Amino acid sequence: MAIRYQELKRRVARRKPEDARALRKMSADAILARAQEVLGSVVHPTEIKVALLRELPANAEQPEFDFDESLENSPLPLSGRAPLTEDDIWMSYSVHRPQGVVLSVDTSLSMTGEKLALTAVAIAVVLLQFPDDPVGVVAFENEAKIIKRPQERISVHQLVERFLDVPAQGYTHLEDGLKAALRVSHDASAAGQGRPASTVLLTDGKYTAGKDPAYLAPRFSHLVVLKMGREKASFNLCQELAHKGSGALREVSQLESLPQIMYGVVKDLLRGRSLA
């Protein structure tokens, strides 16, 4: 159903809009179920912070009494001359380190049907693993469209439904897709407390509109390219984009393996962005 969503929606939308909405929901449900099958355990990066006991945040993980910090900042109470208070006790703790991620996805006619459905699964995998992080999603065909901004808080189901309703057009404007991804990556970096965001580009490497987009790659802090399909003619461009974008190239020769490969990319990003 998800594979044929665009075709089926056109058939029912004019006659029964409620059937089109039900069709979209069922397709999104199927995509999320497939994404859940792919997921395993992923350790999210953390950073160590210190705070007074009374200022310990609710999201603090593994809080511990920090003797050195307490001694340095409250020497008199710790020497036994006065009782300890919450203003004397310092705690060290871990907090989730936000990771900005931007997905730039080809939704042109060459990416319809099963390609688009499995791409939706791959997107869901990212959102399920980064539920509280600044994730942006860009779709491009004749032009680029921002499907989700990094600061926007929506459910994974809502995002998948939005993505399914992106119309597949005839041309592939890869240049415009990368330009939009750059703008969104700046927002993701800002929302991620200034840490450079990683961008993942899903494309078959062919463009039929705009200029050769390779000149944009050096502007990314980290660009990972997932090349869809076995087309050899577009391999060099994908390789150039990944190299100039200080990232890596992953080939997705078997379409069915896209969600698993995306899951591997997610794990590598969380480990520290090493994808070599």
Image: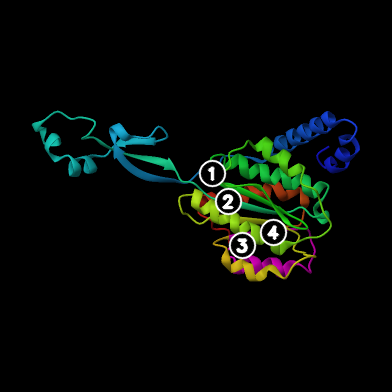
Residue 250 visible? The answer is no
- Residue 248 is tagged as 3
Q: Amino acid at mark 3?
A: Ala
Write down the residue under mark 1. Answer: 133
At 85% from the left and 38% from the top, the residue drawn is 9
Secondary structure found at label 4:
helix
Q: Nearer the viewer, mark 3 or mark 1?
A: 1
Camera-side residue: 142 or 246? 142
> Alpha-carbon distance for marks 3 and 1?
22 Å
Residue 57 vertical placement versus 194 (above, below): above
Cβ–Cβ under 8 Å for marks 3 and 1: no
Q: Nearer the viewer, mark 4 or mark 3?
A: 4
Q: Residues within 10 Å of mark 3 (few under 14, many from 20)?
A: many
At 60% from the left and 69% from the top, the residue drawn is 244
Cβ–Cβ under 8 Å for marks 3 and 2: no
Q: Nearer the viewer, mark 3 or mark 2?
A: 2
- Residue 177 is tagged as 4
Q: Which is more N-terminal, label 2 or label 3?
A: 2
Cβ–Cβ under 8 Å for marks 2 and 1: yes
- Residue 101 is tagged as 2
On the image, the x and y values in percent for residue 28 come to 74, 36
On the image, the x and y values in percent for residue 204 come to 76, 60
> Alpha-carbon distance for marks 1 and 4?
22 Å
* Extreme residue in the front direction: 14
> Alpha-carbon distance for marks 2 and 1?
8 Å
